[in-house]
Image (spheres, rainbow, N blue to C red):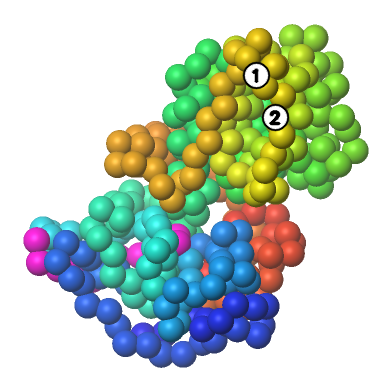
Amino acid sequence: MKTVFYTRNGPADSVLEFADKPTPQPQTGEVLVKMATSGVNPSDVKSRAGRAPAFDFVVPHSDGAGVIEAVGEGVDQSRAGERVWIWNGQWQRQCGTAAEYISVPEFQAVKLDDDIPFEIAACFGIPGLTAAHAIDLLAADNAETVLITGAGSAVGHYITQMATLMGRKVIGTASSGKSDIVMEAGAIACIDYKSENIADRVLELTDGEGVGAVIDMDFYSTSQLIASPALQAKGAIYSYGSNDMGAIDVPFRDLLFKSITLQFFLVYELDEAERLAAIDRLNWFMRSGQARTRIAHTLPLEEAVKAHELVETGQANGNVVLTI
């Protein structure tokens, strides 16, 4: 089967290779999926660049979509021929979705509605489920107005749409070049985080009331809102990332006296109940008739180097998908 793989860390044009590898066989409880598409995410390029391979070679990418071609022992034969999308394809595994075939536990191959293209489904695993779980957390509180950082990113774009669909008022942050994307997704305003003070603008946009919740991609920066009236007392920050992964100082006095909730999560490590709820939420969104997925580039598998470079340099104004 055709694959993209690497044996060492480094720049995409130095370490990514394209060659044939043996087609896997589905083991007990697994399904063999003939891939149609493979999604390229920031975590994929970070792993290739700096996370030492745990195997003699690694086929990258967690996300993708295709058709089940064969099933292993213990899997209902009726699943053969089913259109599916994949999550955690390469998480703690050697072989991800950047190949003609992948064999995964059957619960990691989720049935795909017939009217959803494979290109869009390749964006469900990390962007879609991250957004869906964040919205599940948001659904449990009563915040009327929500600040979404990185609202022009693939994840933030989904979150903005879902939160708006729930009836929440959304203020997004993004660079000036992505403000149109944020507004089209349903936000009431977009703050240019590069040129505007986020806290001041939030207070201005909310007539001094601030927001009740923040869904956040960069806790290192967003933690500065804890002491600001831009985040209401008894507010919450739901965070799935940080540009600084080291120690981050937070003002405990403000956390305590404002009764602020901090909730962090990693989409790779959702438990079974959280995962099923996120999949249900994603289905609700996709079946709403209002869901939009921004695909910036669709490239053949052989152009994986270019795909990685587009994601790594931030040139892609949306998702990057490989076709197989």
Write the residue at 43% across / 51% down. 268
Residue at label 1? 255
Which residue is more in the foreground, 258 or 39?
258
Which residue is more in the foreground, 38 or 112?
38
Write the residue at 29% across / 52% down. 111
> Three-letter amino acid code at disc 2?
Val
Mark with earlier residue (1, 2): 2
Above or below for 215 versus 102? above
Q: Residue 216 placed where, x, y %? A: 63, 35
20 inside magenta stretch: no
Asked if the residue under mark 2 is in contact with the one under mark 1, i.e. CB atoms within 8 Å, the reply is yes
Q: Main secondary structure of the magenta part?
A: strand
Q: Within 10 angstroms of label 2, few (less than 14), some, or many (20 or more) residues?
A: some
In the picture, the quarter occupied by the N terminus is bottom left
Marker count (numbered): 2
Above or below for 283 versus 305? above
Q: Is residue 259 visible?
A: yes
Judging from the image, what secondary structure is the residue with disc 2 in? loop
Range shown magenta: 62-74
Residue 250: image tag: 2
Q: CA distance from mark 1 to mark 2?
A: 8 Å
Write the residue at 69% across / 16% down. 253
Locate residue 76 relative to residue 274 in the image: left or right: left
